[in-house]
Image (cartoon, rainbow, N blue to C red):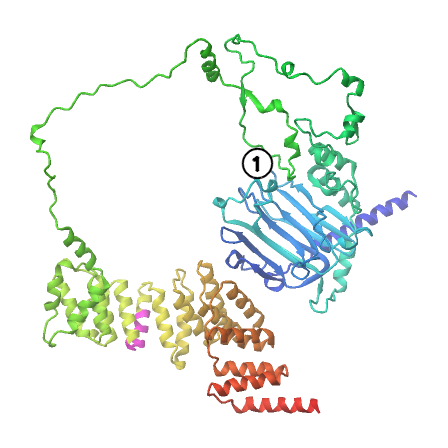
Amino acid sequence: METLSRLLVFMSLFSGLVSGFALQNLPITSFEEGYTQLFGDKNLFVHKDGKSVRLTLDERTGSGFVSNDLYLHGFFSASIKLPSDYSAGVVVAFYMSNGDMYEKNHDEIDFEFLGNIRGKEWRIQTNIYGNGSTHLGREERYNLWFDPTEDFHQYSILWSDSYIIFFVDNVPIREVKRTAAMGGDFPSKPMSLYTTIWDGSKWATDGGKYGVNYKYAPYIARFSDLVLHGCPVDPIEQFPRCDEGAAEDIRAAQEITPSQRSKMDVFRRKHMTYSYCYDRTRYKVALSECVVNPAEAQRLRVYDPVTFGGIPRRHRNGKHRSKRSRVDGTESLGNIGVTRVNASQRNHSKKLTKNLRNPRRTKLPPDFGVNLYLRKPKIEPVVDDYNDDDDGDVQDQESVDDDAVVWEPEEIEAISSLFQKRIPQKPGKPIRVRPLPLPQPHKLRPLGLPTPKKNIRSAALSSVSKQVYKDPSFLIGLAREIKSLPSSDADVSLVLNKWVSFLRKGSLSMTIRELGHMGLPERALQTYHWAEKHSHLVPDNRILASTIQVLAKHHELKLLKFDNSLASKNVIEAMIKGCIEGGWLNLARKLILISKSNNRILDSSIYVKMILEIAKNPDKYHLVVTLLEELKEREDLKLSQQDCTGIMKICVKLGEFELVESLFDWFKESNREPSVVMYTTMIHSRYSEQKYREAMNVVWEMEESNCLLDLPAYRVVIKLFVALDDLGRAMRYYSKLKEAGFSPTYDIYRDMINVYTASGRLTKCKEICKEVEDAGLRLDKDTLFMLLQLEKQTMSLLH
């Protein structure tokens, strides 16, 4: 017999080790493989390893992600590090749900973290719903024995056809066993795994008493070691595809071992603060799945005797007692019977008359220094007992005597002095008599005369001077006046001398650039030489840079003599820009190489202009690749949205799809909103790489950002839907295109004919052909042959 008992103990321990080992060594699913962003665009960040995710809540929005597949049973786990500091009202949720598929009868299994107030323990809530049974709350709340903001801790859900078990750091904290009486209340439909962070100010912390304070934002929750080990379900056929290993792991782990059950009992006895199974205010009789533990019941009854002990609320005025308590004289307090005064005793304790209940006070004043009856309300700071019960029953049971305190000594002294016919006065400020100032006759003036101005200056002249020297219309007007000089021999000084007093350093740079746009490089050079003769206008690198850019653009750089070795960064960049605009690409490339050898870091826009210009010639794509590599090495990359989009388009042509992804991610991480052109380029890049599913993610992101699509965007999106053979979305976007007032191009017509032909929609194909004829276009031979084949197939089916 002893040998048999030892064998049974060994077998139970061995099964616990096997199940624990199986669940602790499951493969970690990468974010790209198993999840999709749910909401929050920029507030979700995936780390480089692809297995760690950061969710952020700020004033703008929260964030979240969802599993790609539906699951029917399995083991789901994540290591979570919660937001630190004051996080009241912030809800971090790790849960399973199918609310998007079953709005009125959805299932749900929840892990919810309900925010934190400084000095309080973090709380965690678990809950389950089945078949839309939200009216039956099955919540349980616990305090955690560690600080979840300091490090990652593992939270897991085990769901089978008969058990749901919640784990924290591989310790089971709650077990829900399916019973026949539960019926559809037990989650039994396929669900997705969700992870979110959001604002739950209305209910999360102390029943909504403490809301989210965005002074401490952003709130960041970190997730890693994401495990999806279960039975995926086909969303259309609703049939699980569960391999033998996953099913075996679920069956092995659903039975809690004696060691695990011991740990669970200790946890629940020490850390559970609420359970619906013991809530007598909600359920007079515990639900069928509840297993009542006397130790748990006793602890909760001490923690909150009103909720868990069945004690009714005490009314202060005593007017709402039940008739039964007045007649029978007894009242049940949980399991304790309290005897009231019986009828014979009540005859001797009749209600006193008003004058006896409120006797007149003595007219003599009390002894000084002693306060026998004067009291005032005590205003104490709110003490949060961290109980989520919205009824506030514990607060109602506070004693009335604790709500008042004795007045302070200074106030007592002031009141007592009234009986002594004296009122203490605060010492006033001493009166200081200041001597009158001596008269100063030399400063006296007759009354009525205005005060003379010390600084006599023309205000109008000053304001005009400040406005003119940087006014674009004035500076461009100077260029037009110079252009309209009567002859080429006339000097620019005829125009500029009239305005020399209004000009400042840098003013003429715009005038010189405008002369370059007008095709007058000689006049631009004359303007620069005129500025050199006026000391208040030189030295100025802005004028020099503009002059060099104009001369380089018109191949007249030899007319200007200056020392290249002393040229500043702006001057070198202007020279390269002028060479690029003038078509001197080889010279511009040499200047870039010289600057690099001299450790001069040029602006990123110079590389962008060079790349865009060289990429016009397919024979020079090898130079583009070299410049892209140099640009990739830049740590201080600064690109405008237009430059970034231009580089992405060139990379798509060259097949550098990884660089396109890097630029797109870099632009979003710089807290800027992509334009519709950038989104279109990104969709086209993934379409060209045949990553259609990833391209769809960009389409949803573009729709979420409320971008107004232009014609190229509609072209690319419709082309993507045709590649996915998604007729419904292609038709919807084709209708949107026409509603927006755009005229479809020939390739859009052809794509729509292709998708209709693949679906056998001959009537729709004929409608598109009619639109093509109305637009004055003609279909190519391949498309006509495809339509003819479709028509023959349709006729053969009819006959």
Residue 588 covered by magenta stretch: yes
- Residue 567: percent from left, percent from top: 23, 64
The quadrant in which residue 161 appears is bottom right
- The residue closer to the viewer here, 529 or 750, is 750
- Residue type for callout 1: Gly
Residue 602 covered by magenta stretch: no
The prevailing secondary structure element of the residues shown in magenta is helix
Identify the residue at the far right of this view.
1
- The residue closer to the viewer here, 25 or 441, is 441
For the point 14% across and 67% down, which residue is it? 529
For the point 77% across and 64% down, which residue is it? 244
The stretch in magenta equals 582-593
- Residue 473: percent from left, percent from top: 22, 65
Q: Quadrant of the C terminus?
A: bottom right
Is 229 above or below relative to 621?
above
460 sits left or right of 656 in the view = left
Q: Which residue is mark 1?
A: 119
Is 617 above or below relative to 497?
below
Q: Is residue 544 visible?
A: no
